[in-house]
Image: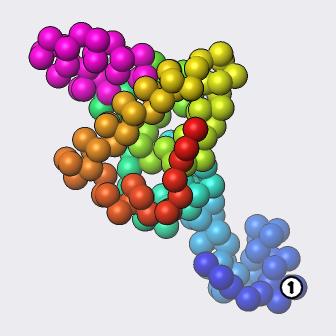
Amino acid sequence: MGHNLTLLELAQVRSGKPTTKRCREILGESVRVLAKANAIIQDNPGISPAGFEGVYLGRQVRSVGVASLFTECEYRFREMGRIASEDSYRAARMKLIEFGGEGLTLNVIDVDFLRRFAQWMKSEGYSVSSTGVYLRNLRAVFNMAIDRRILSSDLHSSSGETFTQ
């Protein structure tokens, strides 16, 4: 966006009643930017500022539902007779949804989200070990998404930040 406005132009744009073509164009662009930002926030209510920036700028296109990926893993474990693994993934899915909401998508999960999730688990009385199991299952789901090219590996690790409990 980045426009340099005079005080008069700024007043026109802010009033919503611009009188010049340039001010009308800037107002229109501002409305489009705000609409795009609001849509991202509505679609991803738990998004962090860094995640928002990535989605807004088109660096992250990870809007696949976490629950559906977990459910697929659960189904595969059931088919293989690995009931304990199925139960572990189901428990992780349920806790992540409880924390992040029904519509939790991959694009909102970043280092900040993981830290907040771990802190929330602790406040709910869960051990570091239980939290670690859920996070390992989540990492496996991310790896599956990368293997399937749902998620780019460079997007997954682009911040350079790491998460430790």
State whether residue 24 is above or below residue 129.
below
Q: Position of residue 12 (x, y in %)?
A: 81, 77
- Which amino acid type is shown beneath numbered disc 1? Leu
Q: Residue at x 64, y 69 (%)?
A: 30
State whether residue 113 is above or below residue 126.
below
Residue 17 seen by the camera: yes
Range of magenta residues? 70-93
Identify which residue, 153 or 122, lies in the foreground.
122
- Report the residue marked by disc 1: 8
Quadrant for the N terminus, please: bottom right
Q: Residue at x 52, y 53 (%)?
A: 162
Q: Position of residue 144 (x, y in %)?
A: 25, 41
Judge whether residue 67 is colored magenta. no
Residue 99 sits in quarter: top right
Residue 81 sits in quarter: top left
Identify which residue, 23 or 49, lies in the foreground.
49
Asked whether, in this view, residue 49 is left or right of residue 162, the answer is right
**Magenta stretch secondary structure, dominant:** helix
Identify which residue, 10 or 79, lies in the foreground.
79
Asked whether, in this view, residue 126 is left or right of residue 149, the answer is right
State whether residue 48 is above or below residue 17.
above
Tell me, what colour scheme is on the image? rainbow
Q: Position of residue 71 (x, y in %)?
A: 29, 23
Quadrant for the C terminus, please: top right
Asked whether, in this view, residue 145 is left or right of residue 99, the answer is left
For the view shown, which residue lies furthest in the front direction? Answer: 129
